[in-house]
Amino acid sequence: MGTADELNSAHDNRSAGLVTMADAARYLGEPLLTSPGQPLRVAVYSRISQGIRSGTFTSGELLPRETELGIALGVSRTVVREALMLLEEDGLIITKRGVGRFVSDSIPHQGLDEFQPLEYLLAEPGADLRVELVEFSLQKVTDFVSDHLELGEDAEFWFRECIATRDGQPVALVQEYVPDDEQLAALNSAVALQLEDAAAEPSTLLQALTTRLGQVFSAGACRIAATVAGPTRAQQLGIKASDPLLVLTQTASLTGIPAYISKCALPPAFGHLAVAQWKPTYPR
């Protein structure tokens, strides 16, 4: 395994913008630990990923070559190449042909392992994220809402729709559903009292309620589906009806009873989505 000095020496003749700091070299030179049954490529993926997220490797920096990474980590070039492919798939690095691999300027969030407002998922450092309210209305129950919120056939629910833009470009169409005032008050009177004022905020409803009341909702299931936009969502997001969408459907509860649904449609412009909610033994 190469020492920090050896790795830094290998970097001396490379162009500006490389990761040449001694702490980065020491980080790579630390023993590579693996769990039983964990492939080496996953251990390398995790080591480099953690280095990127911790700031050891900074945005826009050029990573060491495959051979140098292999020497530093004590693994073969094939293992390194497979790990780098996974890192690129997950949006942590980008490849510039003929130049090398760089840390991405925008690092994807680690996922949905904690129940967070969608702004957490949509935001990027330095980007101008805005949420525009489209509709907030009381509606008769539908099969979709009844199935998720366990409402009766004659019940009503609050429907809220908004569009999130990042630097002026639509990146999400967000629809949120909660029970009507009477049913909501029975679950949490503070949420019922704050609902209409929160719905007027330039944010998702969950963000506004969380800001006002704290973490009152507990997370339920999150389902992810691939689909196409269709005419209505295409018009709202400024894309073609045939364009692909990733749709996240998240449920949440108040005092253990289903009380919130969000359906978030993400067009290709959104970028990368990394999900760690299910906490697998390894990412591949």
Image: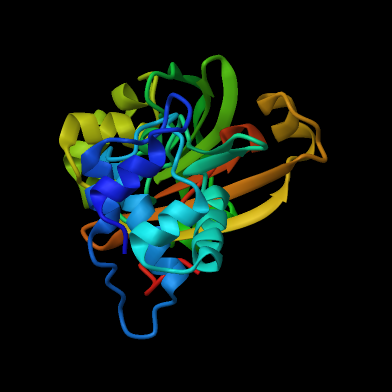
Horizontal and vertical percent for residue 73? 35, 62
At x 50%, y 42%, the residue is 93
* In this view, 238 is above or below 54: above
Horizontal and vertical percent for residue 87? 50, 52
At x 57%, y 56%, the residue is 85
Residue 220 can be seen, yes or no: no
Of 187 and 113, nearer the camera is 113
* In this view, 104 is above or below 73: above
Colour setup of the view = rainbow
Q: Quadrant of the N terminus?
A: bottom left
Residue 40 can be seen, yes or no: yes
Of 37 and 101, nearer the camera is 101
- In which image quadrant can residue 95 be found? top right
* In this view, 259 is above or below 41: above
Of 54 and 162, nearer the camera is 54
Q: Residue furthest bottom?
A: 36
* In this view, 5 is above or below 13: below
Horizontal and vertical percent for residue 145? 52, 53
- In which image quadrant can residue 116 be found? top left
Horizontal and vertical percent for residue 110? 37, 49
At x 31%, y 58%, the residue is 2
Q: Is residue 216 left or right of residue 44?
A: left
Q: How many marks?
A: 0
At x 59%, y 20%, the residue is 169
Q: Is residue 259 left or right of residue 269?
A: left
